[in-house]
Amino acid sequence: MTTSADLYERMAGRNLPQRFLENVERNGSVEVVNWKNSAGDWVSRTLDELADDAARLVTSLQDLGVGKGDKVVMMIRNRQEFHAIDLAVLFCGATPVSIYNSSAPDQIQYLINDCGASVAILEDDAFLRRFEAVREKIPTIEHIVLIESDGAGDDIVKYSDMIAAEPAELATAAANSELSDIATIIYTSGTTGPPKGVMLSHSNVAWTLESVGESMRTQTDIDDFAGKRHVSYLPMAHVMERLLGHYYMVDFATKVYCCPDTAQMPAVVRETKPNVFIGVPRVWEKMYAGVNAALSADPEKEKQFADGVAAAIPIMEKMTDGTATDEEIATWNFLDEVGFKTVRGLIGLDEVEIGISGAAPIPAEILEWFRAIGVPLSEGYGMSETTAVLSWSAAAKPGFVGRAAAGVEMKIAEDGEVLARGGNMFEGYLGLPDKTAETIDDEGWVHTGDIGVIDDDGYLKIVDRKKELIITAGGKNISPANLEAALKMIPLVGQACAVGEQKPFVAALVGLDPDASAAWAAEHGLEGDDATMEAMAQNPEVVAEVEAGLAEAMADFNGAESVKKIKVLGAEWMPDTELLTPTSKLKRRGILATFADEIDALYAK
């Protein structure tokens, strides 16, 4: 069994720039960064070319005064320049800090003053205007760099000029950082208060790369990640995209396809056929709903496919643990040939070798469905404070988030909280020693804030966030996440939020799924204004169908904790708003405030 000490030994004192240069030696000719040009064609840069870009940016950043211990803030969509910039900052011995592209001026002011960045690198004029709105209130910023710099003023540094500089000697610059230096600061989403800066060191990231590399190599058929395709569409300010969409490429030479607009992600996935694909539950739920909505146009085919999935679920479980008979394998292969393979190809997941859902619970039924049709979907668990990773298992157990990753220790505290320890545990919250002490105890255990259980096989199940448990008027502690996952299995429902704090019973707000709603409207002859999601949320037949599904959805919950009433909403909740974080986690306080009248109506006598 791999221990934390084993992984520290494998790191051999190499910081991230040094690991990158070793990767260049191994895989310099591998095309690693891919993006679409203005004509819509895919273009790419090899690892050698990326290293050259980084070397030129090192010279330019040093000319701007960036050195050991400085912070460089970046506000950039998922585009090719990010990777060279992030690397160049590290080679300078400084710390890159990526912030969410949706950040408003007041948020930009807070984040920059919190981290004390001296240079800001922005994508375009739209981002620049937000910075200029608070320019006098962010005194630490000495230079602003603009990537798309046509028409930029004299006080703006042009990225095109920086990338034209003479290249620095990277082997020499790599010595500017120690393993203990901060490699990045990831800001929390601020759902429970002001964002906190999670400090991750070179050691944290390197240890995590050793851990996840071993976990994935030992649980899949992948021996070498060089050239494995990954679609980068989640914000680079999020720890999971930073790990899979950047550090994997830095260390393993994965092939990253940049997707700067999340709305284009499904099309990019279909084009690029990723080998490793990660999505928050909503991504997988929308794919699931889209397939089933398309199938519903032909009831006979819909039933045949559903019957095939039902037959395939137990077979896939046996195939996963190696106990399937030749006859069962032949049955699955037949089902794959006549239906599953086509569906995987249509959604672009026919070459996925590792599929992961993370950031929030995914309904077990959806995970089983994807696995049944041949998409190796599994659920992982982690947080910014653990460098994205705590547990994951390729041999997924629906409802669980896998076993501890290589080298990670996990245990359950007396109050049910999940505690973890390992080399991936963060260095602390920037400037917040008291908050750090609340999270990391004297023995090095990180208190995750999640309630969980570990079964006899070592699989972890997350029950809920410790601070999000609903306590009803009767004193009953209830997990909203489990209820919400069940509600989303009602065919017309795409999103859900359970409510009931200090109320006599649990109720819920449920949002219609766009694809399922469109299919229902077509099936029932609704057109025009009558087919909008807002109109359908008021349609008595739609409401009745959702309410009819409530009993089945709540079948596994006891009377005290099950949802008694629901309010159907028509507008889809969008990421990076007052309702959802950028990775589609519920912002419960925002939802409660926005829908206060609707919630009050659920409890009106």
Image: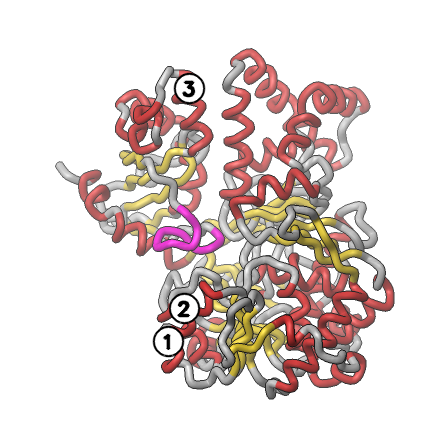
Residue where numbered disc 2 is placed = 130
> Which of disc 3 and disc 2 is earlier in sequence?
2
* Label 1 SS: loop
Is disc 3 surrounded by few (<14), some (14 to 19) or many (20+) residues within 10 Å?
few
Q: Judging from the image, what secondary structure is the residue with disc 3 in?
A: helix
- Circle 1 residue: 134
Nearest to viewer (mark 2 / mark 3): 2
Secondary structure character of the magenta stretch overall? loop
Left or right of 251 on screen, residue 102:
left
Separation of marks 2 and 1 at Cα, in angstroms: 7 Å
- Residue 503 is left or right of residue 59, and the answer is left
| Type of the residue with mark 3 | Ala
User: Magenta stretch?
Assistant: 574-583
Residue 258 rendering spot, x and y as whole percentages = 64, 54
Extreme-front residue of the structure: 151
What residue lies at 41% left-to-right and 81% top-to-bottom? 138
Q: Callout 2, which amino acid?
A: Arg
Marks 2 and 1: CB-CB under 8 Å?
A: yes
Question: Residue 451, percent across and down?
Answer: 46, 55
Task: Please check the rendered image and state whether residue 579 is part of the magenta-colored stretch, yes or no.
Answer: yes
Residue 399 seen? yes
Q: Circle 2: is it few (<14), some (14-19), or many (20+) Cα within 10 Å?
A: some
Identify the residue under disc 3: 522
